[in-house]
C-alpha cells in the first residue's frame, strides 16, 4: 500500500468506526492519548514481563508498543458501543473523530514495523503531514474538550449521585 492510503486509513478509520458504532469520539481521542502514555511508560517492562508467557517465548518490542497504543481505543470502541444518541450529536462527533484519526497516524506510523514505518516516513506526504503535529494535537485536544462540555447532560442529581431526568 502507498503511504497516502495508509495515512488515509489511519485518519478515517476512527471517525468512521466512532460514527457507525455510535461511540463518543472525544473519549476515543482521550483513550488514544492513554495508549500513548502506556507506550511511553509501560512498553519496556511489559515486553520483558510478558515475553516468557508467549508461545514463542518472545514478544517483539514493536508488537508490544502497537498493542499498548491500540488497546485503550479498541476497548473504548467495545465498551462505549451505542452511547452517542441523536443525529446532531453524531454529526458533531465527527470533528473529534477526525482529530482522533489525525493523532492516530502521528502516533502509529513511528511504531509500525521498521520497513513499513520507513517507507511512510520517507514519503513526501508524511513530511507535509508531520510538520502539522502541534496543530493536530492542539486541535484534537480542544475539539474533544469542547465536545465533552457541549455533551454534558442537564439534570438534577438524585441522592444516589445519578442524574434524574424530568
Image (cartoon, rainbow, N blue to C red):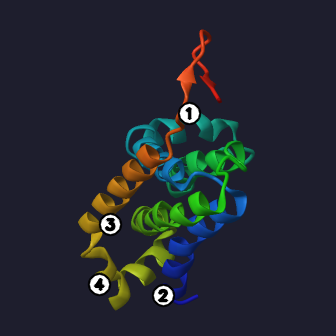
Q: Which of the two labelled residues, at mark 2 and mark 4, occupies the earlier sequence position?
A: 2
Image position of 122 with respect to 53: above or below: below
On the image, the x and y values in percent for residue 109 come to 44, 69
Is the residue marked by circle 1 packed among few (<14), some (14-19), or many (20+) residues within 10 Å? Answer: few
Q: Which mark is residue 4?
A: 2
Query: In the rendered image, which quarter contains the C terminus?
Result: top right
- Residue 163 image-quadrant placement: top right
Kind of element beneath mark 2: helix
* Circle nearer the N terminus (1, 4): 1
Q: Using the image as rendered, state which of residue 164 and residue 55 is in the foreground.
A: 164
Q: Is residue 60 visible?
A: no
**Residue 136 numbered mark, or none:** 3
Badge 1 is on which residue? 49
Q: Is 153 situated above or below 95?
A: above
* Residue 145 pos. (x, y %): 38, 48
Question: Where does residue 152 sit, x and y in percent of width and height?
Answer: 49, 40
Spatial CA distance of label 1 from label 4 is 38 Å
Mark 4 lies on a secondary structure that is: helix
Q: Residues within 10 Å of mark 4 (few under 14, many from 20)?
A: few
Mark found first going from the N terminus, 2 or 3? 2
Return the mark for residue 144. Answer: none
Please identify the quadrant where the N terminus is shown. Answer: bottom right
Residues at marks 2 and 4 touching, judged by CB atoms closer than 8 Å: no
Residue toward you, 48 or 74: 74
The residue at 63%/69% (across/down) is: 16
Tell me what residue is drawn at x 49 percent, y 52 percent: 26
Q: Circle 3 — which element?
A: helix
C-alpha distance separating marks 3 and 1: 34 Å
Query: What distance separates the C-alpha of mark 2 from that of mark 1?
Result: 36 Å
Q: Marks 2/4: CA distance?
A: 11 Å
Crowd class of label 2 (few under 14; some 14 to 19; many from 20; radius 10 Å): some
Where is mark 4, residue-wise?
Answer: 128
Amino acid at each position: 500500500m502507498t503511504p497516502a492510503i495508509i495515512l488515509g486509513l489511519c485518519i478515517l478509520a476512527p471517525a468512521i468506526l466512532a460514527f457507525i458504532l455510535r461511540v463518543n469520539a472525544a473519549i476515543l481521542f482521550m483513550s488514544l492519548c492513554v495508549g500513548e502514555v502506556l507506550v511511553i511508560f509501560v512498553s519496556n517492562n511489559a515486553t520483558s514481563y510478558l515475553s516468557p508467557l508467549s508461545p514463542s517465548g518472545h514478544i517483539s518490542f514493536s508488537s508490544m508498543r502497537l498493542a499498548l497504543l491500540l488497546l485503550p481505543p479498541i476497548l473504548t470502541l467495545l465498551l462505549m458501543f451505542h452511547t452517542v444518541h441523536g443525529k446532531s450529536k453524531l454529526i458533531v462527533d465527527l470533528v473529534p473523530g477526525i482529530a482522533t484519526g489525525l493523532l492516530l497516524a502521528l502516533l502509529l506510523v513511528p511504531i509500525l514495523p521498521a520497513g513499513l514505518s520507513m517507507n511512510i516516513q520517507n514519503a513526501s506526504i508524511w513530511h507535509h503531514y508531520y510538520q502539522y503535529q502541534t496543530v493536530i494535537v492542539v486541535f484534537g485536544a480542544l475539539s474533544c474538550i469542547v465536545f465533552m462540555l457541549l455533551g454534558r447532560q442537564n439534570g438534577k442529581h438524585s441522592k444516589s449521585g445519578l442524574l434524574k431526568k424530568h
